[in-house]
Amino acid sequence: MKENPILETNDVTINFNGLVAVDSVNFKINEGESVGIIGPNGAGKTTFFNLLTGFFPPTKGKIFFYGRDITDKPPHKRVMMGIIRTFQLVSVFDHLSVLDNLILSNIKSSGISYSIGRFFFSEAHKPALKKICLEALKILGIEKKAEIMTSELSYGDKRKLEIAVALSMNPKILLLDEPFAGLSDQEIVEVSRIIKEFKKGFSMIIIEHKISRIVELVERLCVMHEGRLIAEGIPDQVLCEPLVREVYWGKEDGLVCSV
Ligand SMILES: Nc1ncnc2c1ncn2[C@@H]1O[C@H](COP(=O)(O)OP(=O)(O)OP(=O)(O)O)[C@@H](O)[C@H]1O
Ligand SMILES: [Mg+2]
């Protein structure tokens, strides 16, 4: 595959009062590529997403988007560039209707202020925006719930809404932090199918503990441990590396590797 990095980190590090949560990580993802990140609890996966999306400034190192240094760019500017994320704990507005969650997020990501946005989208543009948002809900199978209060949704439906919001924001790269957490087996199958179908249109990084699910969705797997990237490559091969087996499953993992 021809290399065309969309997002890249160079030696990126964050130190929380002595705890190095992300430690000198060099990471690269190409346009159209899907990469998984696994690792034990506390390995630094979510913190790495927080660095990529601008929620935390790195203590050291640089972050590049299409080769451009974005290390100092705030989160909303990165969203406008197409760096879109979902959160480990679902993050939606409970006090808005399902549809208004999507509309508000799209107004915010367009870069216009909320008050101007409300005026702008309340008139000529609202029907077009509403159509995009309803389509996103339809993709996730929750369009019939468009008008209800988000607080009334089940956790699984809130997760679907969060993914609908992310898809409607036209990502160039989508960062999913444990998208299957809190979902039923049936919902995991549905959401996995949707991710598989739509990931063709953008690059994707997915953090997930459910390894059997993540390997179906990504071409490359990275393993984090104590803030460091300790392995990366083709999923089946990475899962068979002795160091990965040791940190992830312990010495006596008992798994049989096929490669
Ligand atoms: N804002 C913060 N301030 C201080 N320490 C933090 C902060 N955020 C994360 N940490 C610490 O950084 C380390 C990495 O946490 P992080 O949430 O990134 O792990 P994770 O790999 O996402 O784990 P999990 O699989 O449980 O979600 C942990 O020790 C955590 O306590
Ligand atoms: Mg996490």
Image (cartoon, grey):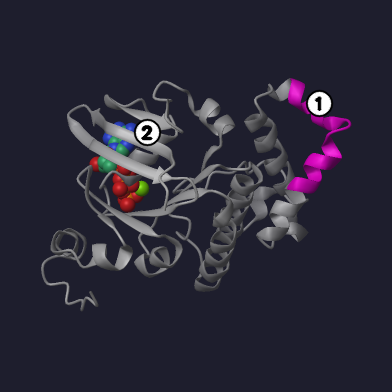
Residue found at x 64% / y 56%: 153
The boundaries of the magenta stretch are: 116-132
Q: Is residue 32 above or below residue 251?
A: above
Residue that badge 1 annotates: 120
| Lower sequence index among marks 1 and 2 | 2
Quadrant of the snapshot with the C terminus: bottom left
Q: Is residue 254 above or below residue 22?
A: below
Which mark, by number, is residue 21? Answer: none
Total labels drawn? 2
**Badge 1 element:** helix
In-front residue for pair 112/96: 112
State the CA–CA distance, disc 1 to disc 2: 32 Å
Residue that badge 2 annotates: 51
Identify residue type, mark 1.
Answer: Phe
Task: Give the percent coordinates (x, y) of residue 165.
Answer: 63, 46
Identify residue type, mark 2.
Answer: Leu
Task: Give the percent coordinates (x, y) of residue 38.
Answer: 31, 55
In-front residue for pair 159/218: 218
